[in-house]
Amino acid sequence: MNLSGKQRRELNSLEDIFGASDDFGLLNVRARSAALGKNDLVASRFEEVNQFIDQHARPPSEHGECLSERQMAKRLKAIVEGGNHVALAGMDRYNLLAGYEPDQVAKPTLYIPPEDVTSIDDILGSDDLGLLDVGDMSILDIRHVPPERDAPDEIAQRTKCEDFWQFEYIFNELHADLKSGQAESVQFAENWQITAGDAFILNGIMCFVDKVGDEHGRGEHRDARLRLIFENGTESNMLRRSLGRALYMEETGRRILRDRDDALVEAFQDIRLTHRDRRTGVIYIVKTLNKNPVLAPFPHLYKIGYTEQTVDERIRNAERDIAFLEGSVQKVSEFECYNMNPQKFESLVHAFLAVQRLNVELVGKDGKKYRPREWFSVSLEVAREVIQRIIDGTIVKYRMNNTTGQIVKKNSLS
C-alpha cells in the first residue's frame, strides 16, 4: 500500500539515487576537518555537547533538570567565550560557536509535589532556581598532594614481659629509695640523656630502661630502640626520642634520680672494655667565641664532647653546626682515649656536671629552636679535673659542690 499517494520511482543505480530529488537533505554531508587528539579535553567536552543535542534536540541549559546538564552548559559557555574556535570548527555541526546564548532555553517549570518526591533526581529536577547547583567542582580535584609516607618499619607495642621476675626487685628498691629519700623524682628536662639503667615515671607508671639498641641517624636525629620495662609487668620497644618527647610533654613525666655518687661508681666499673692499646677516640674541651647576647651571662662556657676524628676536623665547620652554637670555637684541651668506651666516658662527664649544663633555648640560622646538650658553665680547671679524675679512677671519691661550682671530696664539709 502506498500511503503517500505518490508513484514509486525505480532506482537501479547510484546515478539514479544521487539524481533523484532529495527533499529531506539526507545526502547533504558537511565536510569535517581532521579529528582532534583523543586527549584534547576541550574537544571531548564539546563533543559531549553535540551528543546531548543529538539526543535532546536542544543545547544544554544552565537551569537544566540534572547536575550533568548544568555543568555541560557552563563548560559550553566557557568554550564559546574563550575556546579554540579554529580547532573546534570542524566539530561545530550545530553552529554553537557562531553566537550561542546560554539563556535561549527557557527555565523548566517542572514542579513535583512533596508527597511525590521519592529520589534525589526528583529533588534536583524541581530545583527551579538552581539552589542545588554545586557549580564548578574542580576545587575538589586532588593536586600537588605528596604521597603518603611509608609507615615506620616497627611501631612500639606494649607486650607482656616474660622475664619480669628479673626486674621486680628493681622497682621495689626504687620505691623504697623514693620513700627514704635516697632517690628523688624530678621533672624530665628536654636535654636529659636516656641510657640503660635509667628509671622514669610515665603516665603514672614507673618504667626502667633495660637495654638501648643500636643507634641510627646522625647528629641530633640519632635514635635507638629501647627495651623499656614497666612495673605493671609489660614491656615496650619504643624509640628513645619518643620516650623523651612523651616524658617532656607530659606534666607528670618524671625522672628518678638515685644517689649520684653511687650511680657514678657503678658506671665507672664498666668503663674499660679491653686491655688492648688502641685509640678509641678523643674527649675534647672547646670554648665558644659566639657573641650571642643570650650567652653573655655565662662567661665560662665550655663544650665537652667526644669525636673519633681529630679535634681540628671536628670543629672545622663550627659556624654551621648547632653542636657548636653556630659560632667559632677555640680548642682548649683534648684527651686521647685508650682501652675504654669513649661514649661511656663522655656520659660520665655529663652526669657529674649535670647541674652545670647550659639550659637555654637558642634559635639557629635556619630559624628553628634548639637546646645545647654538651655545653657547661664551669671553670676550665674544673672541667679538666673532672676528666682527669675519671681517667685515673679517683672520681668516685669526689662530688660537685653546686654552690661553689668546685669539686670537693665526699667527706669534705665545704
Image (spheres, helix red, strand yellow):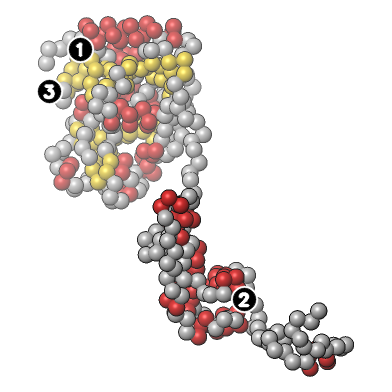
Q: How far apart are marks 3 and 1 (CA)?
A: 15 Å
**In this orientation, does residue 258 appear?**
yes
* Residue designated by label 1: 410
Observer-side mark, 2 or 3, equals: 2
User: What SS does tag 3 mark?
Assistant: loop
Viewer-nearest of labels 3 and 1? 3
Tag 3 residue: 403
How busy is the neighbourhood of tag 3: few (under 14 within 10 Å), some, or many (20 plus)?
Answer: few
Query: Spatial distance from mark 2 to mark 3, Cα to Cα?
Result: 86 Å
Look at 72% across and 89% down and name the residue there: 22
Q: Residue at x 41, y 16 (%)?
A: 229
Discs 2, 3 touching: Cβ within 8 Å: no
Three-letter code, disc 1: Lys
Residue under the image location 31 percent in, 7 percent down: 173
Residue 260 seen:
no
Neighbor class of circle 2 (other Cα within 10 Å; few <14, some 14-19, many 20+) is some
Quadrant, the N terminus: bottom right
Q: Name the residue under label 2.
A: 36
From the viewer's perspective, is 257 left or right of 314? Answer: left
Q: Nearer the viewer, residue 327 or 104?
A: 104
